[in-house]
Image (tube, rainbow, N blue to C red):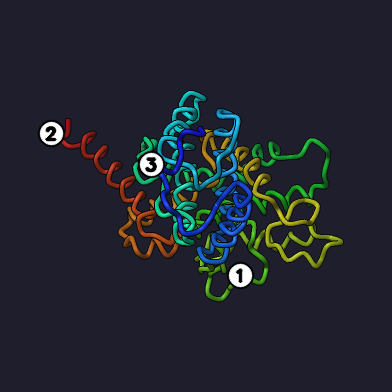
Amino acid sequence: MGKHTAESRGGSMEPSGSCDRADDQTWADRFRVHLRVVRNMSPRTVDAYLRDLLQFQAVLTEADGAWVGWQALDSMAIRRWLMLMHRRGISARSTARKISALRAFYRFLHHEGVVSDSPLERIHAALSPKRLPRFFSEEEISKLLLAPARSEAQAAMLPRDPIPERTRKALVLRDNAILETLYSAGLRIQELVDIDLEDLDWERGRVLVRGKGGRERLGYLGQPCLEAIAAYQAMRTILVEGRARERALFVNRFGGRLQARSIQRSFKIWLRAAGLPETYTPHALRHSFSTHLLDAGADLRSVQELLGHRNLGTTQIYTHVTVERLRRVYERTHPHGQ
């Protein structure tokens, strides 16, 4: 590691600032502030970036017995790290994510005058092929949304310890409203968890959504969704007894704000009840929301705004889904399709 210095081809030569070993943590801390304040990233995303940097540092330190500091790294060191990732069986997708974090960090260091160029400029990591989002067909959506109403499904979701009948009913109505809301508004699971009672606009049929990076948008709720939420809210008081000040729309059976992990567990129960593969995740409802909109003729820019995507390119993946689906339909049905 020591011989791979900034003098090597592809290194960060003649920086105008300084970034020795003692400075590493300082620049990492400044990078954290930069991501939160300047780039307006969510705390969760910022933590993931910093975690990737620490893991990168740990791998090279273990391999070389020492850490030379961010300024001394060059492209050869990056390539050796990529080789180590491959040998350890780390997926191309995970490696590409870490490379993305490293690129962002070195762009920041360059902007601050710490390095004159990035050791990643000549690195082209083998990215995993972009997987198309997995989504439900409209028929599958109908099955899933009807699942909580089925008596056997209701029995399947009962906790092991006995609970009152009215609590059980409130939980079923809650889950029904959750499924409807995820699909109707195309929400991320954390966005749904963060909804408060005052975020609902019943008159206009919409909800205030707090998306990634603290960006807010409006989500629209169809009539079936509004009816499901109203039915749940009529029973919500049963769950929040003794915790009347709880502002979360969706609560657990103890009256506190529901967490994403609990939704994921319940989701598998409803998948099973609907006869659908349990490999689906709640995020598939968001994928279904966008894919079904595009299939029905919605323009890409509108779908981008409804999803809360900052970049149109993120939304464009769904056009590949619909185009690929149309190609399969053509090949299956057209006389000359094969």
Inspect the image, locate mark 1, and give the three-letter code of the amino acid beneath it: Leu
Q: CA distance from mark 3 to mark 2?
A: 26 Å
Query: Which residue is disc 3 drawn over?
Result: 132
Quadrant for the C terminus, please: top left
Q: CA distance from mark 1 to mark 2?
A: 51 Å
Query: Which residue is disc 1 drawn over?
Result: 200
Inspect the image, locate mark 2, and give the three-letter code of the amino acid beneath it: His
Question: In the rendering, at what x and y percent does residue 294 appear?
Answer: 34, 55
What is the crowding at mark 1: few (fewer than 14 residues within 10 Å), some, or many (at least 20)?
many
In this view, the residue farthest toward the bottom is 203
In this view, the residue farthest toward the top is 87
- Residue at (55%, 44%) from the top-left corner? 69
On screen, residue 299 above or below 178: below
Question: In the rendering, at what x and y percent does residue 308 appear?
Answer: 47, 62
For residue 246, side relative to residue 199 (left or right): right
Q: Secondary structure at mark 1?
A: strand
- Residue at (44%, 37%) from the top-left corner? 78
Labels 3 & 2 near each other (Cβ < 8 A): no
Lower position in the chain sequence, tag 1 or tag 2 = 1
Lower position in the chain sequence, tag 3 or tag 2 = 3
Lower position in the chain sequence, tag 1 or tag 3 = 3
Point out which mark residue 336 bears: 2
